[in-house]
Image (tube, rainbow, N blue to C red):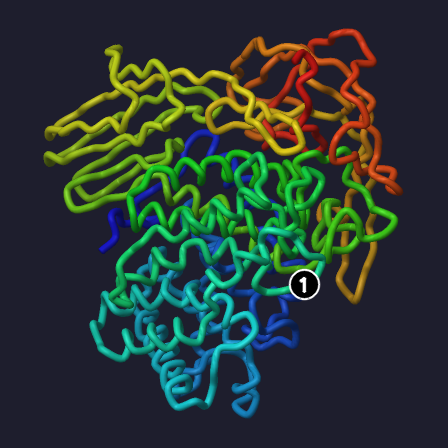
Amino acid sequence: MSKWKFYTSKEIKPEGWLRRQLVIQAKGLSGNLHKIWPDIRDSGWIGGDREGWERVPYWLDGFIPLAYLLEDEELIATAKKYIDAIVSAQDADGWICPCKKEERTKYDTWAIQLICKTLKVYYDCSGDERIPEVIYKVLRNYYDMLKSGESKLFKWAKFRWFETFISLNFLYEKYREDWIKDLAKIIKEQGYDYNLAVDSWKKPSHMWLRKTHIVNIAMMLKSEAVSHELLGEEYTDNAEKLREILDRYNGTAFEGFTGDEVLSGLDPTRGTELCSVVEQMYSYEEIFAHTGDNKWAERLEMLGFNALPATLSEDMWTHQYVQQVNQTACRKTMIMAPFSTNGPFAHTFGLEPNFGCCTANFSQGWPKFALSAFMKNGNTIINSVMLPSVLKDKDVTIRLETDYPFNNKLHYYIDAEKDFDFVIRIPSFAKNLRVNGRAEKTKDYEIAIKAGETQIEVEFETTPFFKKRPNNLFALQMGSLLFSVPVAYEKKMREYTKKGVERKYPYCDYQFIPKTPWNYGYSADDFEITYHKSGDVPFSQNKPPVTVRAKMQQVNWGLKFPYRSICRKTPKSTQAISEVQEIELCPYGCTRVRMTEMPLLYK
């Protein structure tokens, strides 16, 4: 049984900077893909002639909760239109994917796993009572095909088998039928065991392999958490063992992993695919819900407050395929480097700067993060991620007003018609914790709330510190925020049509050319912190909500041969070549061109 249960978009509503971020997303690509992108607009899922596999389910997986969190009637109607088309096309035997009957055995059933997950999201948001039966028929047909040997898991379905358990767990809870458990066992038996892959993670290869594919791996981390109960297995925290190996050999400063399609080592100029960021976030949300282990929620914050916003343009009309921790420009490279298997435009911003999977899939990041703000277990409610939002749970309303993570002040307004237990997850890095003005130990704050009105004020301090990185480089972190040298840039816009798909303002391609120096190292470890109120664009490079002033000097860093826009992994020299300068650093998530891992020049 899960430690915590998720609330739905009917019960959680975003406020403050979080709502502004979701509104930006709705006005950008996420809320408009069905109007402009043929793979969504003309998809085989709704009777069209374009892609009929993962892209519509990927997009709906984020678009649906976005629509319902914002209570946007136009977006909700669009979601219903797509779901109605998908449901109405379901065959009598339960098959739902858009392919001919004679093609089923060659159809990669990753799409079945994904559409069932998406249908569950729609049910959670809408309460549409058709959906449980639709999922039941899909998975019963899947069971019959796999049990009989008519079909089997191969390609993506084999390496993403655990995704089926999102809908399998839902189905078993509702119907309690033995075939569901039998299907769970078949899927795991036919799926790939990533414990067999760890040796291939330790020395990154330039070969494209599914066992080292960064998105598969990001999804996989939740596999034991979501599957062990239905399989009747003991939970062993295997994700921690695998995550530690991944981090040791492929880790990033924002606690994701490098993966320009495949795992890519420890070089801060290697890319991290956007799909992997949102999938790793979702894995951590699920692991925390199933285990209640705070380390997963804290790691979730690192991804959500840093990696996610950094790889999207501020208006969210464009995105990168891969982001770099040290990203000195976002422009076409002469050839594929510094990436293993991606093209030369992979870290530019656009509609579809490499493969279209990220164009469809990035939408889930912010909405599912928002839905992780509060969770419940019986009569206990936890504020699991301190995001500004309102929870309405039958007889209880909790409003959290905060600018966290940009400052560390939180104000809870609680109106309850019944007694309940309330838990506030306190991050491990919090210092000098005070609740209603009284000093408390740094641990989860638990309080028995009585019926009536209650206010709780929480405040703590965070201190900037240097996070040791490979190659004798360091990243500055404060709380859940990384800080980077923001590099001013010139935007070069390109409108064009490729393979019948138009790139037109505001969803055209952009290259970012640096205008200010980036070749710095730290000259001291004393910092001046300035808090600003988050603005209309919460993750703005020009108006960041918090800044850290640091003493720095330029060094002879150099470019990675033979490229004109990619910095070397490490500087040529750590000998200072300038006087000490005071540089205003801003949160990593606010930057698009930046330096994050840099040397210490004073030791």
Q: Which of 517 and 404 is in front in this view?
A: 517
Residue 380 location in percent, x, y?
A: 18, 40
Q: What element carries label 1?
A: loop
Residue 498 location in percent, x, y?
A: 81, 62
Q: Nearer the viewer, residue 241 or 224?
A: 241
Point 65% across, 53% down: residue: 204
Q: Does residue 192 appear to the left or right of 233 in the view shown?
A: right
Q: Which of 276 and 509 is in front in this view?
A: 276
Residue identified by numbered label 1: 208
Q: In which quarter of the image is residue 571?
A: top right
Point 36% across, 39% down: residue: 373
Residue 306 location in percent, x, y?
A: 55, 35
Q: In this view, does 16 lie above or below 105?
A: above
Identified by mark 1, the residue type is Trp
Q: Does residue 335 appear to the left or right of 90 in the view shown?
A: right
Q: How crowded is mark 1: few (under 14 residues within 10 Å), some or many (20 or more)?
A: some
Q: Quadrant of residue 437?
A: top left
Point 65% across, 13% down: residue: 603
Q: In this view, does 209 lie above or below 415?
A: below
Q: Which of 436 and 324 is in front in this view?
A: 324
Q: Can residue 120 be seen by looking at this rendering?
A: yes
Q: Does residue 152 appear to the left or right of 491 in the view shown?
A: left
Q: Can residue 318 be seen by looking at this rendering?
A: no
Numbered-mark total: 1
Quarter of the rendering occupied by the N terminus: bottom left
Q: Is residue 545 above or below residue 507?
A: above
Q: In this view, does 160 lie above or below 248?
A: below
Residue 19 location in percent, x, y?
A: 46, 36
Point 64% across, 52% down: residue: 203
